């Protein structure tokens, strides 16, 4: 072996210079194993759910998230009720990057974002694109989904969505799917009544985030207990972040629930609810 200047060194001398115990036997050198590089710290997985199956679109490490542009929000933390400062990446940017391998047609079919972590939130993709929903970073805890529900209060209230449930701590996975894929069991077969269809859309957006564990919610029970304000019903606790429904919303919901009962008289089961 040659080093700079043309000077010759033996392999033993080079090993000794590197601090290796040259008194070891040749056999001991032979069993030495190479150091395996540490696997990247996987922070987030983005999955596409379609046709009853799932496909992983992207797996992100902390290092791979660094190039994304950061956004800042000053928002009320629903867990504490206090104002908190949040900094992180825009969820829509991460979703767009993760979907790059999909065709335009398949991207267009995705209208629902399911955020999974310490809880589970079902967020319309249109809401994620319209508002600055971020995946906030914090040294003490993993990614945390944060919604601008106080800085854009009036606009967000008009969406009639349970926005407080969109705050999820410890986000580990985001599932991209279509509402028809997730809510097929509650969609009307006869789609000729515009009022019932509007009520269906409202029910899916505002209610199915909680009433999505069972195959079919208690349509009869919900219909019987439907009041102008959900919190007026002792059997249905107030949903924080969800504004009271006005007369137009109530008419649409009643029309949808009536049509759902008529189409599914044998599928109405005991009320089921869950995250």
Image: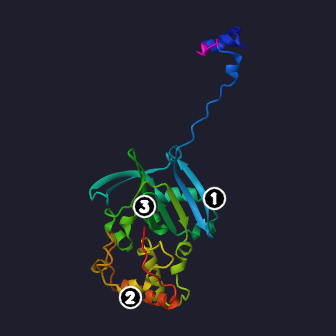
Residue to which mark 2 is pinned? 251
* Magenta-drawn stretch contains 226: no
| Position of residue 236 measured from the top left corner of the image (x, y, whole percent) | 33, 77
Judged left or right of residue 59, residue 115 is left
- Residue carrying label 1: 101
Asked if marks 1 and 3 touch (Cβ < 8 Å), the reply is no
Image quarter (top left, top right, bottom left or bottom right) of the N terminus:
top right
Above or below, 119 relative to 27: below
Q: Compute the Cα span from label 2 to label 1.
A: 42 Å
Pointer 3 residue: 119
**Residue at point 27%, 59% (across, down):** 81
Decide which of tag 2 and tag 1 comes sooner along the chain. 1
Q: Earlier in the sequence, mark 2 or mark 3?
A: 3
Q: Which marked residue is nearer to the observer: mark 2 or mark 3?
A: 3
The residue range painted magenta reads 17-23
Mark 3 nearby-residue class (10 Å; few <14, some 14–19, many ≥20):
some
């Amino acid at each position: 072996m040659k080093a700079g200047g043309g000077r010759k060194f033996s392999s033993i001398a080079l090993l000794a210079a590197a601090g290796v115990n040259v008194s070891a036997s040749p056999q001991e050198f032979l069993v030495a194993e190479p150091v395996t590089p540490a696997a990247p710290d996987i922070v987030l997985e983005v999955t596409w759910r379609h046709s009853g199956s799932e496909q992983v679109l992207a797996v992100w490490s902390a290092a791979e998230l660094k190039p994304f542009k950061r956004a800042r929000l000053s928002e009320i933390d629903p867990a504490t009720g206090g104002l908190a400062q949040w900094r992180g990446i825009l969820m829509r940017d991460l979703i767009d990057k993760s979907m790059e391998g999909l065709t335009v047609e398949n991207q267009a079919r995705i209208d629902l974002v399911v955020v999974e972590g310490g809880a589970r939130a079902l967020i319309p993709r249109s809401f994620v694109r319209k508002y600055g929903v971020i995946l906030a970073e914090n040294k003490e805890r993993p990614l945390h989904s944060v919604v601008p529900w106080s800085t854009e209060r009036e606009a967000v209230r008009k969406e009639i969505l349970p926005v407080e449930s969109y705050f999820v701590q410890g986000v580990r996975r985001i599932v991209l799917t279509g509402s028809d894929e997730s809510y097929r069991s509650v969609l009307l077969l006869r789609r000729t009544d515009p009022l019932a269809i509007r009520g269906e859309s409202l029910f899916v957006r505002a209610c199915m985030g909680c009433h999505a564990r069972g195959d079919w919610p208690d349509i009869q029970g919900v219909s019987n207990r439907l009041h102008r304000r959900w919190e007026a019903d002792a059997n249905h606790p107030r949903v924080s972040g969800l504004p009271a429904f006005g007369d137009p919303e109530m008419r649409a919901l009643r029309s949808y629930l009536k049509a759902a009962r008529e189409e599914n008289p044998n599928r109405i089961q005991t009320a089921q609810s869950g995250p």
